[in-house]
């Protein structure tokens, strides 16, 4: 009589390990997008320390550069430029440049007149002006960094936490079935800091959590999606 071999025991599946560290989400004010003007003001201040002549071409060019960057920064803060609007702005600027080229070709004396007007404007500032501007933004950025430590969200494998208040008050929401939405409302803000809007829909909560100006939103969204998908696999394995 032959013996039937016993079936081999299957090794139990190892549970999916979930990361202990959560994803930190902070909503920043729009002043953070002024960093190009902040950096340029420091550079201009250092340059003017070694330039004693405020009427020289270098000081004038530095002044024009600072005013142009500051103006562009203020435009970014004042308006939203989604993809459709950005294409429209690009089309308008292209039409403006082509129209200017056509106008110059028909009126050759126009360029010398415009050049004389531009040369008559000499925006100059000394080193203390640029350093004071940079110092004001530095103080604001330090205050923003400190205040952000008292109001932020944290997505963990099994829960959504809201840290807020001086005494670190804490609100807990259930993370399973958490839905997230990513919105890029301004293409220039996305270029400057990878910023966008993140909308969280916790389960059993009627009102969504809307976080504006989240830095590097694409990488944050990928990390949250990976974390939540790992949680779903863990739940199915435990059943």
Image (cartoon, rainbow, N blue to C red):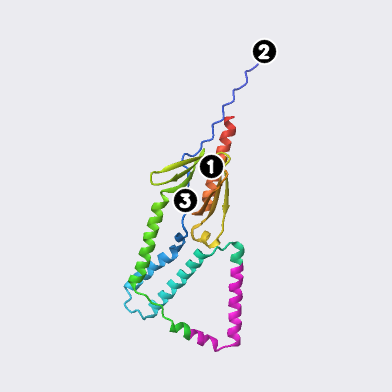
Query: Residue 109 in the image: x percent, y percent?
Result: 54, 89
Residue of label 2: 2
Distance in Å between CA atoms under marks 2 and 3 = 70 Å
Query: Residue 182 in the image: x percent, y percent?
Result: 57, 52
Horizontally, residue 161 falls left or right of residue 94, namely left
Residue occupying the far front of the picture: 206
- Identify whether 99 is placed above or below 29: below
Tell me which label, 2 or 1, sits earlier in the chain.
2
Q: Looking at the image, do the residues carrying marks 2 and 1 touch, with CB atoms under 8 Å apart?
A: no
The local secondary structure at tag 1 comes to helix
User: Is residue 92 inside the magenta stretch?
Assistant: yes
Q: Which residues are magenta?
A: 88-115
- Between 235 and 166, the one nearer to me in the picture: 166
Name the front one of labels 2 and 3: 3
Residue occupying the far right of the picture: 1
Name the front one of labels 2 and 1: 1
Tell me which label, 2 or 3, sits earlier in the chain.
2
- Identify whether 18 is placed above or below 127: above
Q: Which mark is residue 227?
A: 1
Query: In the image, what residue occupies the spot 39% across and 68% down?
Result: 41
Residue of label 3: 26
Distance in Å between CA atoms under marks 1 and 3 = 18 Å
Query: Residue 144 in the image: x percent, y percent?
Result: 41, 55
Task: Write down the quadrant of residue 67 in the picture.
Answer: bottom left
- Identify whether 85 is placed above or below 123: above
């Amino acid at each position: 009589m032959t013996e039937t071999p016993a079936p081999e025991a299957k090794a139990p599946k190892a549970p999916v390990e979930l990361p202990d560290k959560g994803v930190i989400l902070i909503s920043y004010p729009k002043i953070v997008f002024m960093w190009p003007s902040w950096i340029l003001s420091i550079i201009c201040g250092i340059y003017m320390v070694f330039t004693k002549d405020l009427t020289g071409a270098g000081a004038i060019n530095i002044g024009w550069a600072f005013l142009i960057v500051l103006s562009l920064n203020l435009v970014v803060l004042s308006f939203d430029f989604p993809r459709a609007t950005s294409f429209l702005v690009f089309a308008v600027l292209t039409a403006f440049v082509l129209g200017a080229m056509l106008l110059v070709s028909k009126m050759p004396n126009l360029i010398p007149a415009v050049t004389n007007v531009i040369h008559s404007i000499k925006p100059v500032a000394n080193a203390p002006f640029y350093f004071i501007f940079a110092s004001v933004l530095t103080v604001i950025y330090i205050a923003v960094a400190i205040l952000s430590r008292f109001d932020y969200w944290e997505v963990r494998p099994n829960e959504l936490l809201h840290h807020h208040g001086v005494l670190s008050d804490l609100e807990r929401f259930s993370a399973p079935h958490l839905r997230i939405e990513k919105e890029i409302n301004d293409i220039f803000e996305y270029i400057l800091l990878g910023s966008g809007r993140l909308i969280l829909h916790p389960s059993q909560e009627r009102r969504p959590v809307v976080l504006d100006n989240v830095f590097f939103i694409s990488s944050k969204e990928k990390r949250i999606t990976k974390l939540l998908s790992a949680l779903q696999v863990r739940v199915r394995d435990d059943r």
